[in-house]
Image (tube, grey):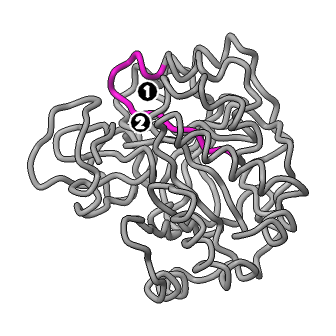
Amino acid sequence: MRRAFAANCCLVHDPATGMTHRAPDPQPNGRLELDDTIVLSWPVVAPADLDRRTPASVCWSPIVRCNLHCPQCLDDTTVSELSAVERHRIAGVLADADILGVDISGGEPLLLRDLTQLLSIIRNGRRSVVSVTTNGWHLTRRAPELAPYLDAIRVSIDGPDQARHDAIRGIGSFARAVNGIRAAIAEGIPVQIQAVLMRRTAGDLQDLVDLAHSIGAGGFTALQMLPIGAGAALPTEMLSDDHARQLLAALRVPTGLRVRLRTRTTAGNFTVIRADGRVWRNTPTALSIGGLHPLLGVTDLVLTTRDGTA
């Protein structure tokens, strides 16, 4: 399947998985269409291993509000939200920055009335691919509107059926998410299902993979839980990266479904922009955050070394 990626020389970013790959040969810079089977066979480059002044990709959470209350949420709900004018300013900064991928998350980004405008501003920079991470509650309604602006959508599913998913995310959330995924696929949006890997959900991993395949998603990503935001209150739910790799290795992966694991190692040094317009970078172990400062311009995205120099 050919779909949108973004490249800078030998670095190629996948908006579906959020991972950056190293191509064996230089690729044309900017947005381009590539065969995803080929791209996903290339090695993944973790943020900590990038040799560049700016991050390859960022997660932007312009909204704190959410209709669900997931116990493992990374968001800091005490943060204030910027005005629409300021959101558009940040979208312009991201459009001008030398980054390959922007994922808009939250909170719940589908609650933003100006979401398509934000996506359009970033896409107009012609450098980045854009994705949205959502709980799927409003996806059926908004999929037709979002389709022209999205390169991929990631839908969070924490249980393979209504009982197990809704026990974590809330009554009715499973049905709304599944219907939303089907609506997005019908609109031609590449869909990635992702689940936060916790002790309580580790035994559901095979069923989650089978669900992703049965719905028709292009891939499934297991995300190692990070002790950030609400998740800081759940340290006993965390699995080691080695344990997570063992769980993934034991899966029976259906033909045509691509399964990925985001370890804490690969989440280290990742860049996040909060709803209040401040930017942080995960520490190398992704167990905490550091370098919190306002995002006023492109230079505020420049990576720094441990001694604080660019």
Amino acid type indicated by mark 1 = Thr
Up/down of 284 relative to 82, above or below: below
Residue 128 shown in magenta: yes
Residue 273 shown in magenta: no
CA–CA distance in space, label 1 to label 2: 5 Å
Q: Nearer the viewer, residue 41 or 253?
A: 253
Q: Is 135 on the left or on the right of 241, as rendered?
A: right
Q: Nearer the viewer, residue 135 or 298?
A: 135
Up/down of 159 relative to 12, above or below: below
Q: Secondary structure at mark 2?
A: loop
Identify the residue at the far top of this view: 85
Q: Residues within 10 Å of mark 2 (few under 14, many from 20)?
A: some
Q: Is 170 on the left or on the right of 134, as rendered?
A: right
* Residue linked to disc 1: 299
Number of numbered discs? 2
Q: Residues within 10 Å of mark 1 (few under 14, many from 20)?
A: few
Q: Which mark is residue 265?
A: none
Q: Secondary structure at mark 1?
A: helix
* Residue linked to disc 2: 302
Q: Residue at x 15, y 33 (%)?
A: 28
Q: Residue at x 31, y 61 (%)?
A: 44
Task: Indicate the position of residue 217 as horizontal and vertical percent values.
Answer: 51, 55
Up/down of 83 relative to 46, above or below: above
Up/down of 217 relative to 15, above or below: below
Q: Is 221 on the left or on the right of 133, as rendered?
A: left
Magenta segment: 122-134
- Whether tag 1 and tag 2 are in contact, CB under 8 A, the answer is yes
Instruction: Place residue 73 in its image quadrant.
Output: bottom right
Q: Residue at x 66, y 55 (%)?
A: 156
